[in-house]
Amino acid sequence: MSWLPQARPRGELLARHGESFKWLVLAVVGVGTIAAVLATTSFNVAVPALGMHFGLGQHQVQWAITGFLAALTVAMLPTPWLLDRIGFRRLFLGANLLLGLASVAGALGESFGFVVGMRILQGVAAGLLQPLPMLAVMRLFPAGNQGRAHGILAFGIVLAPAVAPALAGMLLDSFGWPAIFLMSLPFCILAGVAGLYLLPSPEPAAHQPFDWLGVGILCAGSLLAIDFIVSLRKHGLLDPWVLSLLVLSALCVAAFVVHARRAAAPIVSLDLLTERNFAMTGVVTLVYGFGLYGSTYLIPVFLQNALGYDATLAGLALLPSGILLAVVIPLAGVLTDRHSPRAVMVWGLVLFGFSFLLFAWRGSAASYAEVIAFSLIGRFGLGLTIPALMVATMARVPPVRLGQASMVSNYNRQLGGVLGVAVVAVFVEWRSAVHGALEGGLHLAYVQAFLLLALVFGLALAVAMRMAPRLR
């Protein structure tokens, strides 16, 4: 299509835009990633409306959530190969276009099956987009500026989910559930148009054969793990089907290790996982996803079920901390560039874990203002953690492995998030049943759930302390 702007080499774009070029590219990638984040975080509010519109129960409507989640997780896996095969520009623009088209089609859907199909396509696009921001920072910015770049990029990415539920609720009330699909569209259009002009043409690379067997094993393991997590929430850990899913997921991991040792070009090289700092940050990333999504689920439910607040107040309780998180992240990026990423990360983990101890300490005696204050402390700690964690994850990764490293890191965070929600929900139900006959048993169950989150972050802190104090 001759009317589209032609891709230009990086050197030509750098000569035209100077030092601002890398920041322009970062803005393009950030806007595209915000579109993916909005598609990920805004849809939960539409579940009741979809059920009413199509005459379905909540367990059926959840397929729109589960299908998106499964597609997002699996779509991350071929990203390193696609980056090598078609380049950053084509992958970003293609995934962005797919997200925009699926959003429009979903809004026009007349059957629930079609809506689920479009949610799956949105999940594929979001999964392809998620590893790209971290990779863009590592390719564009020198070591001394990577923390600041990660912080600025994460500002919009984190602010989007903080604002998305409230915005989605207003759109839903005014225009119905199709408007939720369209929330991502303006960002897709902006990122697509800007990307055509600013993203450079791909540089020549040695194309590797596609690791069909490795991707197949990881896809099977990912889908089994997601089914395990969903089933865990429904049936509990001791259910035979749940246990079988856990065993099959573990067998897939073992099978991939055997395959990766023998394959000439596995989709994820085991050499990457033997680098100590990358392995350590992988554990911290998993816990960060666990704590972020687990607490985002637990705190509003605690406010409603244990403290008796309505859904509106429960939802608004996390808004100030979400805004604070977006503000702190760029400042934490500057700190990461000036000080040891490990030190910044450790302080962040301490504050995030301490906030859960405060929730456990006050329990059902906590006021609404205290809940907001404790959430602010936790999100401040999380804001310190994110840029330092991103820099530490990629600092010692060889350039040829950057695509794989970014994919693995995002996969860990996503899996941790799903696991966090499921484990926290099952834990609260279990402890509520155990303490059901006691006075204040429900409140005690929530106290123990907050202690569980604090313990998980204590383990992450112990892992982070074993990282090298200086990464370069």
Image (cartoon, rainbow, N blue to C red):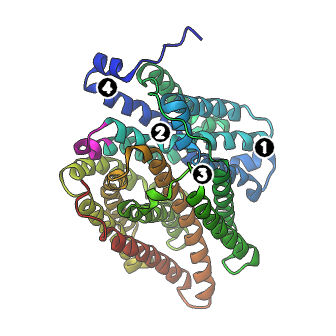
Q: Which mark is residue 112?
A: 1
Disc 4 and disc 2: Cα gap in Å? 20 Å
> Can residue 45 be seen in the rendering of this structure?
no
Q: Mark 4 or mark 2: which comes first in sequence?
A: 4
Q: Which mark is residue 389?
A: none
Instruction: Pick whichever, 349 or 298, lies toward us.
Output: 349
Q: Answer left or right for 377 relative to 425.
A: left
Disc 3 and disc 2: Cα gap in Å? 17 Å
For residue 296, above or below residue 336: below
Q: Residue drawn at (46%, 79%), measured in percent from left and top?
A: 447
Task: Give, as a three-letter code, the residue at label 4.
Answer: Phe
Choose mark 2 or mark 1, whichever is in front.
2
Q: Is residue 145 shown in magenta?
A: yes
Task: Using a 10 Å C-alpha cutoff, classify the residue at mark 2 as few (fewer than 14 neighbours), some (14 to 19) or many (20 or more).
Answer: many
Task: Using a 10 Å C-alpha cutoff, classify the residue at mark 3 as few (fewer than 14 neighbours), some (14 to 19) or many (20 or more).
Answer: many
Q: Residue drawn at (62%, 59%), measured in percent from left and top?
A: 259
Residue that carries the numbered disc 2 in the rendered image: 34
Q: Mark 2 or mark 1: which comes first in sequence?
A: 2
For residue 469, above or below residue 428: above
Task: Give, as a three-letter code, the residue at label 2.
Answer: Ile
- Residue at the farthest bottom position: 438
Q: Mark 1 or mark 3: which comes first in sequence?
A: 3
For residue 248, above or below residue 447: above
Disc 2 and disc 1: Cα gap in Å? 26 Å
Percent of width and height locating residue 276: 37, 64
Q: Answer left or right for 78 relative to 363.
A: right
Percent of width and height locating residue 420: 53, 66
Q: Mark 4 or mark 1: which comes first in sequence?
A: 4
Residue that carries the numbered disc 3 in the rendered image: 73
